[in-house]
Image: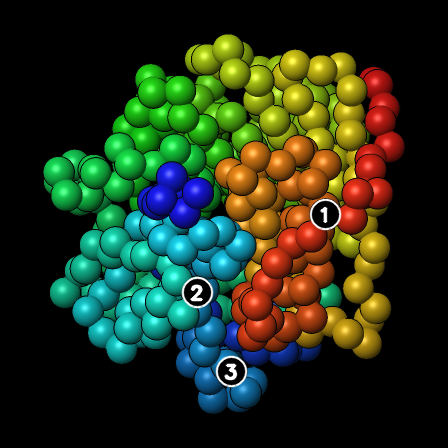
Amino acid sequence: MSQDLKGALVGFCNPLLDISSVVDDSLLKKYSLKANDAILASPEHVPLFQELIDSWDAKFLPGGAGQNALRGAQLLLPADSAVFIGAVGKDENAQRLKGAADKAGLRTNYMVNEEKPTGTCALLITGPNRSMVANLSAAETYSAEHIKKPENWKNIEDAKFYYITGFFFTVSPETIERVAKHANENNKTFTMNLSAPFVPQFYKEKVAETLPYVDILFGNETEAAAFAQNFGIESDDIKKIAKTIADLPKESSKPRLVVFTQGAESTVVASSDSDEIRVYPVTPVPAEEIGDSNGAGDAFVAAFLSQHILGRSVDECVEAGTWLGGEVVREIGPNYPNRELKYVPSGSFAPKVLKL
C-alpha cells in the first residue's frame, strides 16, 4: 500500500514560523484584534511581532495551516505519502520549518525566495482562543511558474488527492485553478479549507470560481457564517449552510462533502448526494488538560484526509479528526504528540442523522 500511496497527497499553503504567546485582552485591544480570528498583518501590526518576543515569553513553532495539516496526515499514512508546496526565504526559519516537516516524514517542495525572509505568524493565545496575524513575506511570493516546471508538476501528476487552504487565495489563485482543473479532468479528489472569515469575504470571486471543483470543503462555524453572509445564504443554521454549499453547482458528478467543525461543539457534515445532515458528537477536552487550541482544526483535517485516503467511511474520518484534534489541543502550539500516532476506529462512533 505504501508504494501505491507514494506522493498521493499534495498540499499548498503559506509556510510560516509561528511566534506564539499567551497574552491577555489588553494586547488584543491594543492591536484591535478579535480573540478567535485570523487576519493578514497590516502596517499597524508590525510592532506586535517584536512585542511578543520582548514582553510575552514567545515560543517559536513550525506553522502554516497547510503544512500543519500535511504533517499530521503524513504521521497517519504510509511513508512518503504527502508532499507540501509553498514559498520560504533562504534563512534559519525556513530550516526550522523543514526540520519539523522532516521529523514527520513530510516531503517539502519549497520555492525559495532569496530576497525575502520566511513568513511569520503571531499567535495570541487567550484561554481557549487564538488570534492569528500573518506576515506572509516570502510566502506571498509563491508563483505558478514554480509548479509549471516539469520536475514540480510531476508532484501534481503523481498525486491522487489535493488540499488547498483558503489562505493560498491571497498568494496564487492561478496555482489553485491549475491544480483544481487537473484534479477534475483526471477524476482525482480536490479538497479545500475556507481557513478564515476574510477568505469568503475578500476573495469571494476566487472562492466562487474554485468551488465547482471542490470535492470536500472544510471550515469552522465562523467561516461558515462568513460564507453564508457573503454568498447570500439567508440562514445562521450551520446545518443549512453546509447543505446549501454541498448542493451548489459542481463540475463533476462526484458528490461534494462539506465538513464544518465547531470547536468543542458538534461537527456537521452534509453531502450533495443525500438529504441527510450528519451531526457528530465531540467530547470536550477537560479544561485542565488544554494546552491551547492552535492547530486543532488543522489536526482534524489531517486525520480526516488521511483516513479518507485509506478508504475509511465518513463516520470514521470524522472520528479520527475529532480524536487527533483533541490530542493537539493538549499540546502547546500546533504540535503533535511526541509518540507514535495511530487511529483505531471505535466501531461505535455515530452521528445524529437529521433532515432539514
What residue is pinned by disc 1?
Answer: 345
Q: Is residue 29 visible?
A: no
Foreground residue among 122 and 6: 6
Q: Which mark is residue 128?
A: none
**177 to 50, vertically: above or below:** above
**325 to 58, vertically: above or below:** above
Judge the density around disc 3: few (<14), some (14-19), many (≥20) Cα neighbours within 10 Å: many
Kindly check if marks 1 and 2 are in contact, taking CB atoms under 8 A apart as contact: no
Rendered location of residue 187, percent (x, y) = 40, 20
Element class at badge 3: loop
Foreground residue among 274 and 311: 311
Separation of disc 1 and disc 2 at Cα? 22 Å
Rendered location of residue 229, percent (x, y) = 64, 30
Q: Earlier in the sequence, mark 3 or mark 2?
A: 3
**31 to 146, vertically: above or below:** below
Rendered location of residue 340, percent (x, y) = 57, 68
The quarter of the image holding the C terminus is top right
Q: Earlier in the sequence, mark 1 or mark 2?
A: 2
Q: Name which residue lies at 28% across and 28% down.
A: 178
Separation of disc 3 and disc 2 at Cα? 24 Å
Kindly check if marks 3 and 2 are in contact, taking CB atoms under 8 A apart as contact: no
Q: Name which residue lies at 57% across and 34% down.
A: 311
What residue is pinned by disc 3?
Answer: 58
